[in-house]
Amino acid sequence: MDARHTDVVEALYGHTHLPGHCDGLLQNGQVRGAGAYGDEAAAGRSGLSRTGDEGLSGVPYGYAGECFAQEAFLLGGSPADDHALRAVQDGGADLRDLLGGLGAGVDDLGDALAFGAAEVQGGYTAYAAGFILFQLPHAIFTVSVVTALLPAMSSRWAAGDRAGLRTLVARGIRATGVIVIPATLAYLAIGRDIVRLLFEHGATEARSGELVADVLALFALGLFFFSTFQLLLRAFYAMQDTRTPALINLGSFAVNASANLLFVLVFDLGVRGLALGHATSYLFSSTVALLVLRRRLEGFRGERIGRSLGSTLVAAGLTAVVAWGTARLIGGWLGTVSVGAQAVQVFAAIGVGLVVFFLAALIFRIEEVDTVKRHILARWR
């Protein structure tokens, strides 16, 4: 397999998932396929495939075919099928829904640490490790909010209360922002420190950690859009509509594929381009889904959503600056050679950052912080 074909296969691997539906397929090929890639890393190899190029080249097409088959099933579904199809539509896009409870996040973190214990040098393992960290804020926290809203959204639609459903969706968007916007800026500010703590041990080199941190940062750019799309999907399901999400997913598939090919082949970004393509596809899908829902529900209170997200962005920006400064200060004081020093650096930065965020939330009167707290506490009782 020549280098050009290798790039094409890499690009295909990045888009053999339909956002919000087949997002787990790439994960199935990389994260859950740790037997293939993990063994390869442990053996000190960073090649394309453990079983040979021929064995790998057809896999993306098979995964893509599976996605299209399931999407076609959803397109042909009727409202009576919605309960059964909901699990299919959710498949893989949300680790927390898929595996249940905090155990999913812990499981994923364990997989991530396994990659670090072996060798995070190849682009595929860097993608997988970055993707795991990217999903954690959504999987552990955002899902609690989305899950709590779904029954209420369904009852509002069943009662013909469009205004009530509209209010719940808007509340969900604001609450989602309170969780993932700070997480996004935190990844941009101290993502490199987090990756160093989790992965740069044993055979893993600093260069490999830099690649994972870059991939994580580019994934993080799409975190808000990713989580928002998961919320909007539930709104469609509450309206007994699986066809619209399927159509949006097909369009997003095309955007994802085109963006991956552009970033990988034209701009030569490699695995970084796949992460950026992932973010681009969710920007597209969340925007389209929001526009469709806005028309069906006769508008949203856009000014309140914008005001809340703006305040959250400012508070998260202050948090990121303080977290970055704390990490630099402690890193300069203790160094970053030992695991203990790295742990102090990261957890101190996160702790100080959280204090700053909650103080800023009080100052800016971001009421969604209390909403998120209630939903999370109720979920874990």
Image (spheres, rainbow, N blue to C red):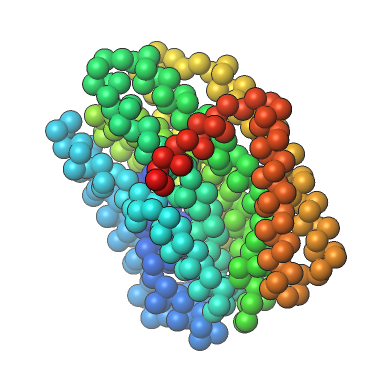
Residue 351 lies left or right of residue 73; in this view the side is: right
* Furthest residue in direction front, as rendered: 381
**Looking at the image, is 139 positioned above or below residue 39?**
above
Q: Is residue 299 visible?
A: yes
Residue 121, position as x, y percentages in the image = 59, 73
Residue 40, position as x, y percentages in the image = 47, 81
**Looking at the image, is 306 positioned above or below residue 55?**
above
- At a point 52% along the width and 49% down the height, the residue shown is 137
| Most foreground residue, 229 or 244 | 229
Where residue 49 sits, quadrant-wise, is bottom left
| Most foreground residue, 13 or 27 | 27
**Looking at the image, is 302 positioned above or below residue 258?**
above
| Most foreground residue, 55 or 249 | 249
Residue 275, position as x, y percentages in the image = 55, 53
Where residue 150 sits, quadrant-wise, is top left
Residue 335, position as x, y percentages in the image = 81, 70
- At a point 47% along the width and 17% down the height, the residue shown is 300
- At a point 81% along the width and 58% down the height, the residue shown is 328
- At a point 28% along the width and 27% down the height, the residue shown is 154
